[in-house]
Amino acid sequence: MSADLISRARAGDGEAFRALTEPHRRELQVHCYRMLGSLQDAEDALQETLLAAWRGLGGFDGRASLRTWLYRIATNRCLSALRAASRRPAKEWDIPGVEPPEPTRIGDVVRLEPYPDALLEGAGTLPLGPEARYERTESLSLAFVTALQVLPPRQLAVLILRDVLGFHANEVADMLDTSVESVKSALKRARAGLYQRRTVADRQPPPAAGSPAEDAIVATFVRAYESADIAALVALLTDDVFVSMPPMPLEYEGRNVVARFCAGIFGSGRRFDLVPTRANGQPAFGAYLRAHTGIRHGTGLFVLTLAGDRICAMTRFENSVLPSFGLPRSLP
């Protein structure tokens, strides 16, 4: 059937081409997201990949699987995008009436967006290759994707293809038009760079998604945040809790400074309602600021990283990401 579809697609049958590529669409989008760190950039790269595949199907010789061939195109499209992209400027603090505390440090990853869990359906239907070192959930977590973004483009591509997707070294070398030795060297450097960036030490694993344990943490967080109960909120945090706000570079680490940061957010009577969703396999919330008019304005999206029965990280994104999660810009 695949051979028949390929023949028809080569003859210009768009429906046959869609039948060939649709089973791989979601996983290719996730692959582009891991490489680019942005849902919008990933969608753009996916569209370019499908267009290139449609135009170049006559050159598909069948030596590798169609899936591998599509990954080759997608990876090289992402590499081109990374090399052509100028560094995005960090955004200045823009919350009126709130003076943030001195940050623990200034981050260097501002090119980052969350990935809606709703888009993951169909993205993991095929088993990972035997070389894969990471579970699917871990390899899409915000901590992992953030750490990937500081790797040089070629190292980034090799690590994802080898350690996340499990392709063999010779397959990766063919995808990148390089040697197996070059792939092994790039992978070694990428692993070292990733190890330096990742801060997951001896933390407990997060509770299973949708489990009673996760639901309990989430419910407690919502109550504390919506009521501006700083003490209850801080009680949920690990000692080394980490807060970041891409594309703003300010980063805060540790309970005390995060408590001061939250106190500033809730100052002047600011109160919020949280609407639950999920991002990167983690609990997430659209945050809506209550106004005296009764309208609640979306101010951003929070993603929680859990460790055991505590929150070890909170990442806040701009309100521009809300539509990707099916959330409105404002609530009545």
Image (tube, rainbow, N blue to C red):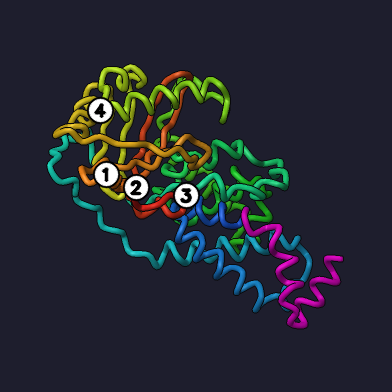
What residue type is disc 1 on? Gly
The residue mark sitting in front, 1 or 3, is 1
Q: Are marks 2 and 4 in contact (CB under 8 Å)?
A: no
**1 or 4: mark nearer the eye:** 1
SS label for mark 3 = helix
Q: Main secondary structure of the magenta part?
A: helix
Q: Residue at x 76, y 60 (%)?
A: 65
- Do the residues under discs 1 and 2 have CB atoms within 8 angstroms? yes
Closer to the chain start, of discs 4 and 3, is: 4
Q: Is residue 124 left or right of residue 143?
A: right
Magenta segment: does it hold 16? yes
The residue identified by callout 2 is 332
| Res. 19 in view | yes
Which of pointers 2 and 3 lies earlier in the amino acid sequence? 3
Q: What's drawn in magenta, residue-wise?
A: 1-26
Amino acid bearing label 3: Phe
Q: Which residue is mark 3?
A: 325
Name the foreground residue: 259 vs 83: 259
Q: Amino acid at mark 2?
A: Pro
> Label 4 is placed on what type of residue?
Val
In the displayed structure image, the side of residue 324 where residue 253 appears, left or right: left
Graded by Cα atoms within 10 Å as few (under 14), some (14 to 19) or many (20 or more), the crowding at tag 4 reads: many
Residue, disc 4: 258
For residue 55, what is the image quadrant?
Answer: bottom right
Q: Secondary structure at mark 4?
A: helix
Q: Is residue 77 above or below residue 225?
A: below
